[in-house]
Amino acid sequence: MGANAVLLVTIRMEAALHEPMYYLLSLLSLLDIVLCLTVIPKVLAIFWFDSKSISFSACFLQMFIMNSFLAMESCTFMVMAFDRYVAICHPLRYPSIINDQFVIKAAIFVLARNVFLPMPIPILSARLHYCGENVIENFICANMSVSRLSCDDVTVNRLYQFAGGWTLLGSDLILIFLSYTLILRAVLRLKTEGAVAKALSTCGSHFLLILFFSTILLVFVLTHVARRKVSPDVPVLLNVLHHVIPAALNPIVYGVRTQEIKQGIQRLLKKGRS
C-alpha cells in the first residue's frame, strides 16, 4: 500500500507525469489501496487480536467493495492494455486518441460498469434468511461463503455471481489478450533490435501480471466449486493472496520499472532531503 501511495504522490507532484498513461496508473493504484484497506485490516485484526466477528452491514459492504473494485481493477487493466496497443501499433495517432478526454470517459466507464453490475450481489445475499450458526469459513465476506450459511435457496446468487464474474472479468481478459496479441505482432515486425527487446520486456511483464491476476481468481473459483476435494484453507489463502499480491506487484511492474516515474521519485526524495 505504501508503494501505491508513493506512486500517487509522485504522479500528482511531477508535472512531467501529467499524461493519460500515468493518470490510468494512478487509478490502478487508488483501486489497490481501497482493496487493501477493505481486506487487510480485518485479516490483521483476526491474526493479532482474534477479532473474528463482523456485523451484517459491514460484511455486505465489504462484499460489495470487493466485487466492485476487483472488477474495476480488471477493467483498468483492459484500458491500459488498449493504451499500450495504440502507443505501439498506432504511435502517430496516439495523442489524438489517448488524451485527457479519453481518460475521463474511461474512468466514468470503469466506475459505472463495475458499480452497478456487481451491486445485486450483496443485495441478493442480504435478502436471504440466515437461521443457523453464522460462521463463514473465510477471512473475508466472500459472496458464496456468506450465502452458503443461508437456509434459503441460493441458486440465483450462484448464477448471478457466475454470470456477472465471467461477463465482467472474462470480457476484460479476452480484450486484454487481443490487445497484447496485436502488440506482439507489431513488435515482431520492428527492425530495430533494441526496440523489440524493450517493448517485449515492458509488455511481457504487464501481461504476466494480468495473467497472474486472472489465474489466481480462476483457481479460487474452481476450488470453491470443488470444495469437497480440497482443504477448506486453500480458498481462504487464495482469496487473501488475490487481494495482496497484485496490489504489491502493480506499482513495481507498472511504476518503478518506468524510467519517468523512477526519475520523478528520485526528484521528490531529493526535495524531501533538502
Image: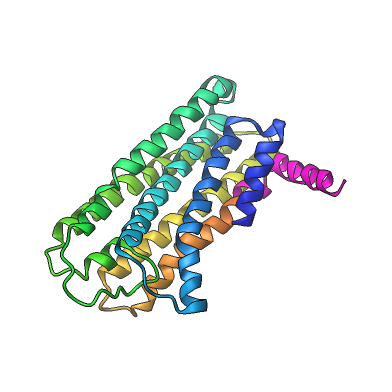
Image location of residue 192, percent across then percent down: 68, 35
Q: Would you identify the image quadrant in which residue 197 lies?
A: top right
Residue 40 lies left or right of residue 263; in this view the side is left
**Rendered residue at 42%/45% (across/down):** 72
Q: Would you identify the image quadrant in which residue 226 lies?
A: bottom left
Residue 33 lies left or right of residue 52; in this view the side is right
Image location of residue 26, percent across then percent down: 57, 41
Image location of residue 60, percent across then percent down: 31, 58
Extreme residue in the left direction: 153
The residue stretch that appears in magenta: 253-274
Q: Main secondary structure of the magenta part?
A: helix
Quadrant of the frame with the C terminus = top right
Extreme residue in the right direction: 274
153 in relation to 135, above or below: above
Q: Is residue 266 magenta?
A: yes
Q: Nearer the viewer, residue 118 or 99?
A: 118
- Residue 212 in sight in this render: no
